[in-house]
Image (cartoon, rainbow, N blue to C red):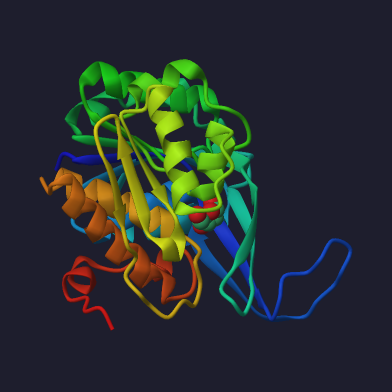
Amino acid sequence: MQANVVVAGSLNMDLVTRTERLPRPGETVFGQSFTTVHGGKGANQAVAASRLGARVAMLGCVGGDAYGVQLRDGLLADRVDCVAVRTVPDCASGVALITVDACSQNTIVVVPGANGCLAAEDIRAFDHVLQGAQVLVCQLEVPMETVGCVLARGRELGKVVILNPAPVSAPLPGHWYGAIDYLIPNESEAWALSSVPVDSLESAGRAARRLVELGAGKVIVTLGALGALFVSAHRVMHFTAPKVEAVDATAAGDTFVGGFSAALAAGMEEDDAIRFAQVAAALSVTRAGAQPSIPLLRDVQGFKAP
Ligand code: RIB
């Protein structure tokens, strides 16, 4: 069955500790628990899109280790097509060291491992997968050249192209912007890309407008409890966040992006797709972990604001 959403990106095993509070530099604190959880921004977004109703294919790389087998099996169990997930022998799978505190804030250190091997040739080898999709989704946990290749090919093929610029460590190449239909940063990514400090709804709007001026089609800044801000050349719209009891914010942004992609692929109008993605992300915040926290379509459809 042809995928209607294709995600090119990372797969990580998340090594997660919970602590009362995050340690300061040089400080040792006791953790309360340790778990290994399937994660990686690419894989999380693929799982979210699949659980939320899309037919999804993933382009990515895992290492030739036990984590690689587990990560691929996890995606398959979520009905994500893994034909284009390559195993790189003699390479470790990506891992993320995550610490979550009592306020559900987290810090994440990612060691890319095999994710660094996803090359432009991999994208070209699976061009038929891209051709069959409606929506293409990328993040920045795989090499920039590879992301650039997906964006350019997506634009050539006339697909809906979504970039979640996470994590961001440098400005995006200028020529990328024109290939992006939806740029979905959080507040710190919007700040880093636009050079506009973001500490309010108003400043998020200025940052997003700058990103539209740079050439992005539409920008959706995800602002956690403050909701989401949509900005295009013609329209600004704020979407308030559903209120939930937060347990762990890991993968909330990924759930938003995956949910939004699935909603667009299902033919939902843009504003409804944003609201749908917000409910999915809010539900993910009420549960611990990356992929274990991502809701199913029926959870989102049955959501009632408390
Ligand atoms: O966005 C959350 C993800 O970031 C985690 O699953 C971790 O793997 C890192 O990629």
Q: Which of the image's four quarters has the N terminus?
A: top left
Q: Quadrant of residue 130?
A: top left
Task: Determine the image quadrant of residue 155.
Answer: top left
- Seen in the picture, residue 257 relative to 241 is either above or below; the reply is above
- Residue 55 lies left or right of residue 67; in this view the side is left
Question: Residue at 17% across / 44% down in the picture?
Answer: 265
Q: Residue at x 32, y 45 (%)?
A: 230
How many labels sit on residues?
0
Above or below, 27 against 141 in this view is below
User: Which residue sits furthest right?
Assistant: 26
Q: Is residue 288 left or right of residue 6?
A: right
Name which residue lies at 32% across and 62% down.
Answer: 240
Q: Quadrant of the C terminus?
A: bottom left
- Who is closer to the viewer here, 99 or 192? 192
Left or right, 194 with reference to 263? right
Does the rendering let one see residue 57?
A: yes
Residue sitting at x 59%, y 68%: 105
142 sits left or right of 28 in the view: left
Residue 257: x %, y % from top left: 35, 49
Q: Where's residue 147, x and y in %?
A: 45, 28
The one nearer the camera, 77 or 289, is 289
Vertical side of 42 occupied by 69: above or below: below
Query: Residue 213 location, x and y as percent?
Result: 40, 24
Question: What residue occupies the far front of the structure in this picture?
Answer: 202
| Residue 133 on image: x %, y % | 20, 34
Q: Is residue 79 visible?
A: no
